[in-house]
Amino acid sequence: MSRKVVRASKFRHVFGQGVKADQCYDDIRISQMTWDSNFCSVNPKFVAMIVDASGGGAFLVLPLNKTGRIDMSQPTVCGHTGPVLDIEFCPHNDNIIASGSEDCSVMIWEIPEGGLVTPLKDPVVKLEGHSKRVGILSWHPTAHNVLMSAGCDNVVILWNVACGEAMVRIDSVHPDLIYSACWNRDGSQILTSCKDKTIRVLDPRKGTVIAEKEKTHEGSRPVKAVFVSDGKILSTGFSRMSERQVALWDPKSFGEPLTLQELDTSSGVLLPFFDPDTGIVYLCGKGDSSIRYFEVTDEAPYVHYLSMYSSKESQKGMGYMPKRGLEVNKCEIARFYKLHERKCEPVVMTVPRKSDLFQEDLYPDTMGPEPSVEANEWFEGKEGQPILISLKDGFATTTKTKEFKVHKSLLKTTSAAMGHQHDNTGEVHALQKEVKTLKETVEELNKRVSELESKN
């Protein structure tokens, strides 16, 4: 009788846990839109969620520590005229967020330190180039101010955000609706999945197809695809019998999948989140109440099932915290922000360890917030490798002066490109008011001095 040998892995016992009720964000009306995006974006400073809004589109941006019940009067970002479909924080600046909407535009917003005090209606930049709604956004991982957007007009546009310009327009590759679009680790390739059941690897600057695979999943429901380690591709989709599948592909030989596993018969689209540091991929189904996670390795069957986090309530969306926002002293290897109908609940993934010292094997050097190349250099052909940081002493957010400088240059170049200066009338009025008040105070004091002098 042969004994089955259990595969050795330090991630075999990873477990997920929802935080306590007082650490959730309550009383938020999450958007009812039937769109297969994450609906949530997080970074070490803020959490952003797309919310229901009457007459237009809005999303909520909260500082991470503002937990508990969120007031109905909490200001939102509400400049879109149609519902917001996707939001994503800039990886190189925690105060900048992009949003794509049904009104066919992409907007870039600057969130003030400490969060919003008044509703934010005016974007830093408005990017117009799509003729139908914009449902997918993705910032370049290493180039500063480069944003990719994909719309229902089957077009992918690469923007130089600093000057509000569409630099590359890929409009002849996709014959049908684009389901997903993402970058590889250094941003030298784009991966898209499309309604024609084909996944394509594209050259981002030329807009040409490097490799493609037809009929990755036989079913007609949406396919999502992400790059994993060593340039391989992980895709989620449906079989002809509507069973959910996960597959791993090697773009160098796209013929047959390295592995194809059937999971269950739910109808929700599986959103994949890949962590390159640990090799774990998390699959979050829209409408599911669970998160499955697998380890991607070099040995067959390549995608190894680890475990599943289950809860009672189903998820309407999911935010994924970058590595630099995790608590390393608690062996936290991932944190998700799970959207319910009326709240957002953080879910923490932990590797159980007895020691509370820094675990070097769990936290190799990871992607930092510094870009390695500027937008114009990248569009001219310069590649930028990720600049890695150590998490040994925890990660402190970048200095304010640097961020301020980035903001200022962004604002300056943008206003020049947009052909108008920012409207400063409100600021001028406020200053005039202040001057008037000071003048009145000075007059009052002079009066009192002259009265005292006359008495003496």
Image (tube, helix red, strand yellow):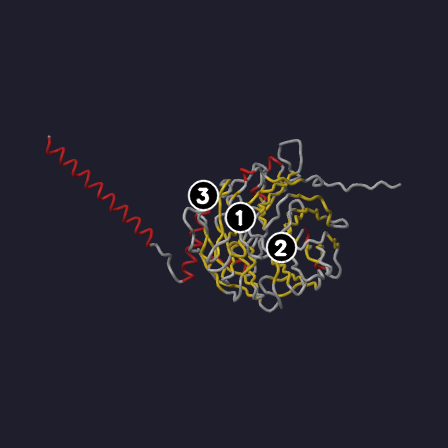
Badge 2 element: loop
Pick the quarter of the image with the C terminus: top left
The mark nearer the N terminus, 2 or 3, is: 3
Q: Which mark is residue 114?
A: 3
Relative depth, front residue between 11 and 165: 11
Badge 3 element: loop
Q: Which mark is residue 161?
A: none
Name which residue lies at 16% across and 38% down.
Answer: 447
Q: Nearer the viewer, mark 1 or mark 3?
A: 3
Q: Is residue 74 above or below residue 214?
A: above
The mark nearer the N terminus, 2 or 1, is: 2
Q: Which mark is residue 184?
A: 2
According to the image, label 1 marks what residue?
Answer: 370
Badge 1 element: loop
Asked whether the residues under the numbered discs 2 and 3 touch, taking CB atoms below 8 Å apart as contact, a structural biologist would say no
- Outermost residue to the right: 1
Three-letter amino acid code at the position of disc 1:
Glu
The mark nearer the N terminus, 1 or 3, is: 3
Three-letter amino acid code at the position of disc 3:
Gly
Pick the quarter of the image with the N terminus: top right
Q: Position of residue 268 (x, y in %)?
A: 65, 54
Three-letter amino acid code at the position of disc 2:
Asn
